Amino acid sequence: MSFPSYPTIAAIGENLDRINALFSPFRSRGLNPEHYDQKLKFWLKSIDEFSSVEKRMVFSVKDLEAAFKVQGRVSACFLDVMEHLRRTQTVVTETEYLQALQTHSTWLSWGARPVKSVANYLWSWTPFNSSTQKSITKETRLVYTPAVSSLASTVLLDPELQNKLMTLEEWREKVQLTVDPREIDLLLGYLSSTGSVARDKLGETEIIKLLVAAPGQTMGITAAEKGQFDITRTKEKLENDLEVVMGKIQLAENHARVALKDGQRLTAKHHLRSKKLLEKRSDKLCGLIDNLTAILFQIEDAQSDVRILAAYEAGKDALGKVLKDNNVSVDRVTNTMLDLQDALEDQAEISSTIGKGIVDDDTKLLDEELEELLRADEAADKTQPEYPNVDQNTSTEEALRELERLNLEGLDNLEEAEISKEEKSPSQI
């Protein structure tokens, strides 16, 4: 059994009882409110998945029946579900949709609202209400409003489309990757009505620009942008022409070679003459392309200068505001620096004073007494007898022998002194 590739309906699997219950017509809600609400919720979610997966914002009951066919069986609920969506202000007919595009202000409000709130707001801007709605058929094409808002948001977020000028055909080619090609114009109408798209004409060519707010970005198509776009397209056309001419030059040269091999000199000359004319044409095209390229570079430089100047001005304004808000001036800065210098000098003086320590009045007297003690110690050192140097490593026996020698020398000296004294005594007598 094959199932559509939508999560909600694929989840029921091959449960035949479940399929029969969901595909059978709705019964009166009063008989079983819970079952009625669950069934309705199932199909509402399935339709939303269909719109999201297929990128469709316009479809009919027949489209839904074909999309959700299971084993040749179609649901008998879609007509009732779509009538419910109209009553709950979630779908409108294409006619109602196109008429609503004329009320720009209300579409702006719709486009600014989240997708879930679109349905609750829709009938505040449509010229219809539930009392004037006509019954829909299986062929009636209905616009699913949540899909319109969702697809519009997707397109607006595409960086390849944002604020870029291009032809309407180029825009359609890029957008059809996101939106069903049959519905691009309906989406374009919505974007134009919400002010998200600017449209203009360049000669017979319609040009378009998707407007997304950005710093320094002009919200519209300016004369300068149109001029730059025209130059760019002209340059591209000349480059294509040059490529064609270069191909013709090569072809003429080949024909001349073939004619010369065949002995057809006049034909060969004819081809060479054509080649010369084509070369002149290519030279002219190259000159024109160079000129246009130089102009484009100058335009880009000018645009860059404008952006840089705007940045400088913004920086100047921001800096001035900061200085003004904080009352910063040259005089204030000068006074602050002078006060800071004075404070630093005071701190240096305080540190120096603290480092000197506490002064004692008796310091001078103590110094004099200390000097006297030093002089006394020096005098005492000078009066002490000199002792022979004794090696600290001398043994005890050696020390004793040395002491005995000194004693003997002392005795000898004493005897000599006594003898000398005796000799002098008689004479004195």
Image (cartoon, rainbow, N blue to C red):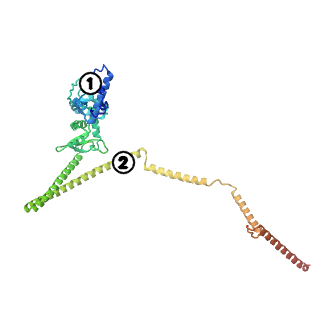
Tell me the crowding category of disc 1: few under 14, some 14 to 19, or many 20 or more residues within 10 angstroms, Cα based: few
**In this view of the protein, can residue 100 be seen by the observer?**
no
Rendering quarter of residue 131: top left
> Going by the image, does 276 lie left or right of 89?
left
Q: Is residue 247 above or below residue 314?
A: below
Please provide percent x and percent y for residue 22. 28, 26
Q: Which mark is residue 169?
A: none
**Residue at the disc numbered 1:** 24
Please, what is the three-letter code of the amino acid marked with disc 2? Answer: Gly
Q: Is residue 330 above or below residue 398?
A: above
Please, what is the three-letter code of the amino acid marked with disc 1? Answer: Ser
Rendering quarter of residue 357: bottom right
Tell me the crowding category of disc 2: few under 14, some 14 to 19, or many 20 or more residues within 10 angstroms, Cα based: few
Please provide percent x and percent y for residue 350. 58, 52
Quadrant in which the N terminus appears: top left
From the viewer's perspective, is the residue at label 2 or at label 1 nearer?
Answer: 1
Q: Nearer the viewer, residue 110 or 371?
A: 110
> Going by the image, does 164 lie left or right of 316?
left
| SS at badge 2 | helix
Q: Nearer the viewer, residue 332 or 160?
A: 160
State which tag comes first along the sequence, 2 or 1.
1
Q: Is residue 409 above or below residue 135?
A: below
**Residue at the disc numbered 2:** 315
Q: Is residue 328 above or below residue 381?
A: above
Q: Nearer the viewer, residue 48 or 132?
A: 48
Q: Residue furthest top?
A: 31
Rendering quarter of residue 155: top left
Quadrant in which the C terminus appears: bottom right
| SS at badge 1 | loop
Q: Residue furthest bottom?
A: 427
> Going by the image, does 186 lie left or right of 339?
left
